Amino acid sequence: MKTEIKYKKLDGSNGVALVPGSVEEGVAAKRELADRMNLPLVPGQEHDADARLRNGGVDPNSLTVQLLSASA
């Protein structure tokens, strides 16, 4: 199983990330995307996934999550 995370960049373009396993919407998806993109932690805001995404050029409010099942 994989999870597809779609997002908008701050420049208006779109992006898609495939991550292994099941990822829930919300903070978990934001953290997974920031980790997948290797975005650095923001000093003083180490636990703020929104700040990491914004600094990486991603609109943190634009994420949509869809679970993809593996074909047999």
Image (tube, grey):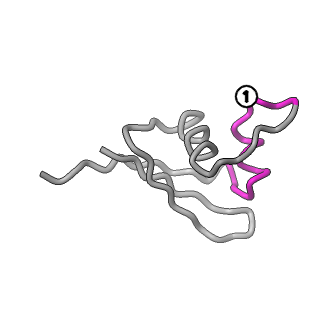
Question: Residue 15 in the image: x percent, y percent?
Answer: 56, 64
Location of the N terminus (image quadrant): top left
Residue at the image position 44 percent from the left and 53 percent from the top: 18
Q: Which residue is mark 1?
A: 47
Q: How many marks?
A: 1
Question: Residue 72 in the image: x percent, y percent?
Answer: 12, 51
Where residue 20 sits, quadrant-wise, is: top left
Residue at the image position 54 percent from the left and 40 percent from the top: 29
10 or 36, which is in the foreground?
36
Residue at the image position 72 percent from the left and 41 percent from the top: 50
Residue at the image position 23 percent from the left and 50 percent from the top: 70
64 or 15, which is in the foreground?
15
> In this picture, is 13 found above or below 61?
below
Label 1 Cα crowd, 10 Å radius (few <14 / some 14-19 / many 20+) = few
Does residue 33 show up magenta in the picture? no
Q: Secondary structure at mark 1?
A: loop
Where residue 58 sits, quadrant-wise, is: bottom right
Question: Residue 19 in the image: x percent, y percent?
Answer: 44, 47
Does residue 53 show up magenta in the picture? yes
22 relative to 48 in the view: left or right = left
16 or 63, which is in the foreground?
16
Residue range (magenta) = 44-60
> In this picture, is 24 found above or below 59?
above
